[in-house]
Image: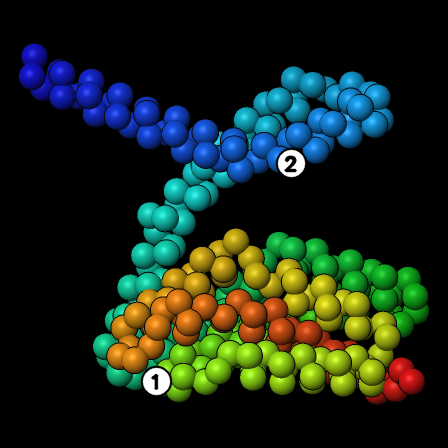
Amino acid sequence: MAQKAKRQYLILTLLRRIFAKLKEAGRDLLPIILVITVFQLAVLRQPFPQLLEVLMGALLVIAGLMLFVQGLEMALFPIGEALAIAFARKGSLAWLLIFGFALGFSTTVAEPALIAIAKTAAQVAAQGKIIASDEQTRISYALGLRLTVAVSVGLAISVGIIRILRGWPLHYLIIGGYVIVMFMTMIAPKEIVGIAYDSGGVTTSTVTVPLVTALGVGLASSIRGRNPMVDGFGMIAFASLLPMIFVMGFGMIVFGVKIAW
């Protein structure tokens, strides 16, 4: 009887935790649901098409968000922080930088949003007769764009690691980076500028952000004299900044330099 009562208690505790997590996920999605509902019913004055499927989809999104957040808390955050602390204790700067680069490159090159942007950019470039319209050229252009962004994110993570180790002020690096972005915007081909700015936004994926954040916080926590709140954050800013510079450079190589003024 004692074993049965204990098992029932554990099941009830698990169900309560799952229900609490579902409530949190639903609360996070509530603003989006309200906006869509108000515009659909009050502005467009139309019923939801396939209402049952919409409701089922909303429930799946809530469940998926709950599982995703729980997975971050259980796996990605602890892994990123543990790896950062282990590399810091190992005292090998080379391996730490290699790990940071590989982390940024691997998570970015497989990012679905970046794949979609690169594919669309290749199609539009072919339609505008900027590149040849054959399939192989479009594939090469899209792949080159993806690899350029992935390399830039890998280097951004490495720069962020060096900044934490050296204690460099974040604002100087960010301001300097955006000065370069503004200058390159004036000389880069206009066909690539918008793509470059969008590439900076899509690089921070759902896997990259928690891993890189945990890496930065863990590294700053393990180094004497570093404040995790001050030094542990900021890598994501580099991961958004460097792709703009690299993609505009990629455009200059592919299309040539065209001064905008």
The N terminus lies in quadrant:
top left
Q: Amino acid at mark 2?
A: Ile
Taking the spot 78% from the left edge, 18% from the top edge, the residue there is 47
The dot on residue 32 is 2
Residue 84 coordinates in the image, percent (x, y): 32, 70
Circles 1, 2 touching at the beta carbon (< 8 Å):
no
Q: Is residue 142 visible?
A: no
The dot on residue 248 is none
Q: Is residue 58 left or right of residue 126?
A: left
Taking the spot 52% from the left edge, 31% from the top edge, the residue there is 26
Q: Amino acid at mark 1?
A: Leu
Q: Is 110 situated above or below 66?
A: below
- What's the distance in space between the residues labelled 1 and 2, CA to CA? 44 Å
Q: Is residue 93 visible?
A: yes
Q: Is residue 190 left or right of residue 233?
A: right
Classify mark 2: helix, strand or loop.
Answer: helix
Q: Residues within 10 Å of mark 1 (few under 14, many from 20)?
A: some
Taking the spot 58% from the left edge, 32% from the top edge, the residue there is 30
Q: Nearer the viewer, residue 227 or 84?
A: 227
Classify mark 1: helix, strand or loop.
Answer: helix
Residue 85 coordinates in the image, percent (x, y): 28, 70
The dot on residue 93 is 1
Q: Is 182 situated above or below 48?
A: below
